Image (cartoon, rainbow, N blue to C red):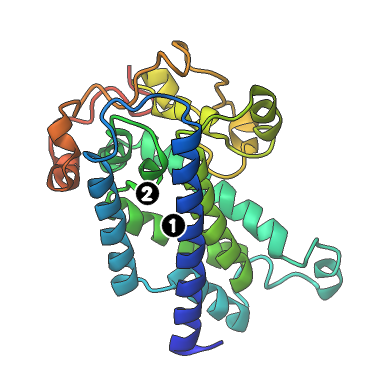
Amino acid sequence: MEGPYRLDSETTVRLGAFLCVFAAMALWEVLAPRRPLALGRSRRWPNNIGVAVLNAALLRTLLPAAAIAIAGIGELEGWGVFNNLPFWLDAYLPWGAMVPSVILLDLAIYLQHVMFHAVPALWRIHRMHHADLDFDVTTGARFHPLEIIISMIVKIGAVAVIGAPPEAVLIFEIALNGTAMFNHGNVRLPAAADRALRWVLVTPDMHRVHHSVERAETNSNFGFNLSWWDRCLGTYRAQPRAGHLGMTIGLDQFRDPAELRLGRMLVQPWRGGAGAYPLGRG
C-alpha cells in the first residue's frame, strides 16, 4: 500500500478501532460505573470530544501517518536497530521485530509521560489532561494540541531509532488509543480481575490514581499500555490514599467548572504558574 491509498486505509482502520472501543467503554460506564460523576457528561463530553476532533484534524493536516511513514522509509534506508540486525538473529525474534518494537515503543511513551511531569514547561501543557474534574473515557482523549504534536515528534524519533516495522507502528497506535480509553474508563472491574490484569496491563483503577489531586499520587502510575514500567522503575502506586470513591480527581488549579470549556482548556498552559506538581518540586 503506497501513497494516499495507504494513508486512507490506515486512517479507516484506526478510526474504526477508536469508535468501537469508545462505544464499548461508554456503554460499560453506563452499565457498571466505578464512581458517580461529579459534573456529568453534558458539561464535559462536548469539550473533551471537541479537543480530540481538533487534535485529529491537526495531525491529519501537519503530520499525516508520520510515524508509519518514517517506519516505511526506515525499512528502505536501513534506519534503526531492527533494520540492521543480522538475518540469523532476526529469525529468532518473536514475529521478527514486531513484538519487541511494540514493547519498546510503549517504553518510549512511558518515558515521555514522565518527562511531561518532570519539566515544568511541559507540565504546563500536559496539565490540561489532569485538569478534568471527572475521570471517564473522554478524559483519555483530552490532551492539549501542543502535547499531541510533541508526542508525535517523540514517537517518530523512537520509531526511527528502534527501526520498527510499519505494521508494528500501526498495531501500537491502535493499542495506545484503545488502552488510553480503557484505563481512563469509569468502569467497575471485579477486584480479582483487576489484581490479575494489572500485572500486565494498566487498569482503570491503577491509572485513576494518577489523576488524584494529591501530588504524590499524580506523580505515579505513568504507564498507558503495560504496567511493567511503573513496577520496574519505582513509580507504581497500588491504591489512592483516600480510596477510589473518596479520592478527588483533578488539580488544585482550574477547579472552577467554567475551566472545562474548550476555549479555557486551550489557553491553560499560559495561565498561572506551573504549581507544585512537576516532579522534583516540593
Residue 154: assigned label: 1
Give residue 84's position: percent from left, percent from top.
70, 72
For the C terminus, the quadrant is top left
Residue 123 placement: quadrant:
top left
Please name whichever residue, 16 or 249, is drawn nearer the observer in this view of the structure: 16
Q: Position of residue 54 (x, y in %)?
A: 25, 60
Residue 1 in percent (x, y) is at: 56, 87
The residue identified by callout 2 is: 141
Against 141, residue 29 (above or below) is: above
User: Label 1 is placed on what type of residue?
Assistant: Val
Decide: is 116 above or below 12: above
Q: Quick check: 54 left or right of 185?
A: left
What's the residue at 44%, 21% (across, down)? 217
Per the model, the C-alpha gap separating discs 1 and 2 is: 18 Å
The answer to whether marks 1 and 2 mark residues whose Cβ atoms lie closer than 8 Å is: no
Among numbered discs 1 and 2, the one appearing first in the sequence: 2
The residue under the point 25% across, 29% down is 39
Type of residue at label 2? Ala
Q: Residues within 10 Å of mark 2 (few under 14, many from 20)?
A: many
Q: Residue at x 25, y 38 (%)?
A: 124
State which quadrant residue 172 falls in.
bottom right
